[in-house]
Amino acid sequence: MENLFTLLQNNPYPGRGIVLGLTPDGTRAVAAYFIMGRSENSRNRIFVADGDGLRTQAFDESKLTDPSLILYAPVRMFDGCMIVTNGDQTDTVVSRMGEGRSFTEALRTRTFEPDAPNYTPRISGFLQDDGNYTLSILKSAEGDPASCRRFFYEYYNVLPGTGHFIHTYAKDGDPLPSFRGEPIPVSTENDVEAFAQTLWTSLNEQNKVALFVRTIDLASGEIQQTIINNRHEES
């Protein structure tokens, strides 16, 4: 397993990232989602709890220039399961699952983001109520928008203390290079607050925007979560 915090400390711009896994004590599923930004429009965001889910919101409405790819619901619950994504495909998944379709079937109707020349990958996670999970990435063919590549990774009988990390960009660049390879195996922690604080500290100070970390008790369904917003810290 890789050290998640070291990976982030050594990468100034992984973009948006998802971690899913199981706590070391084996009793709770853990999920984390963070966003970063290089432009003022991207940095002008905060995470806001929305019922049992999460949404992004402009910190300063007067400075919002284009909401199309930055305002969405990253987290929604469906039938005891959690969907976490980096875009409006969250709604696609929930809608299609409501029609009896699967997580993968829903994402096969979507592609990468239309933000040339980066063509940012759409990353998504599906955390089941038993702790098993699936991660997905939809990305262009090495930056060619004529072709979409869809990858799905399923994890069952998850070992305590382990998780998997996927993010949008391999590193900083112009254009930004997409994440490559399988989700990275990483270790988790029992203390959601400590995990969140260390994760937040590991993100690049200039580029980090917001972080969400949640644990779900596999027996009771009890939720513990932490939200950290960079703009709140500045206010």
Image (cartoon, helix red, strand yellow):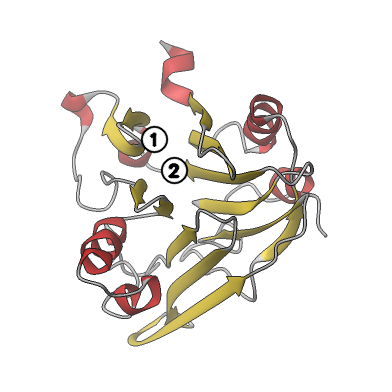
Q: Quadrant of residue 153?
A: bottom right
Residue 33 horizontal side relative to residue 62, left or right: right
The label shown at residue 76 is: none
Q: The residue tagged with tag 2: helix, strand or loop?
A: loop
Q: Quadrant of residue 180?
A: bottom right
139 over 52 or under it: above or below = below
Amino acid on which the number 2 mark rests in the picture:
Gly
Residue 49 horizontal side relative to residue 196, left or right: left
Q: Residue at x 69, y 43 (%)?
A: 27
Q: The residue tagged with tag 1: helix, strand or loop?
A: helix
165 over 212 or under it: above or below = below
Q: Residue 8 or 18: which is nearer the viewer?
A: 18
Residue 213 in the image, given as x and y percentages of width and height: 55, 36
What is the CA distance from the residue labelled 1 to the residue labelled 2? Answer: 5 Å
Q: Residue at x 50, y 36 (%)?
A: 212
Residue 19 in the image, given as x and y percentages of width and height: 60, 52
Q: Earlier in the sequence, mark 1 or mark 2?
A: 2
State if disc 2 and disc 1 touch (CB < 8 Å): yes
Residue 149 horizontal side relative to residue 9, left or right: left
Q: Which residue in the protein does label 1 denote?
A: 43
The quarter of the image holding the C terminus is top left
Amino acid on which the number 1 mark rests in the picture:
Arg
44 over 24 or under it: above or below = above
Residue 26 in the image, given as x and y percentages of width and height: 74, 47
What is the crowding at mark 2: few (fewer than 14 residues within 10 Å), some, or many (at least 20)?
many
Q: Residue 116 or 47: which is nearer the viewer?
A: 47
Q: Residue at x 16, y 25 (%)?
A: 62
How many numbered circles are shown? Answer: 2
The label shown at residue 37 is: 2
Q: Quadrant of residue 141?
A: bottom left
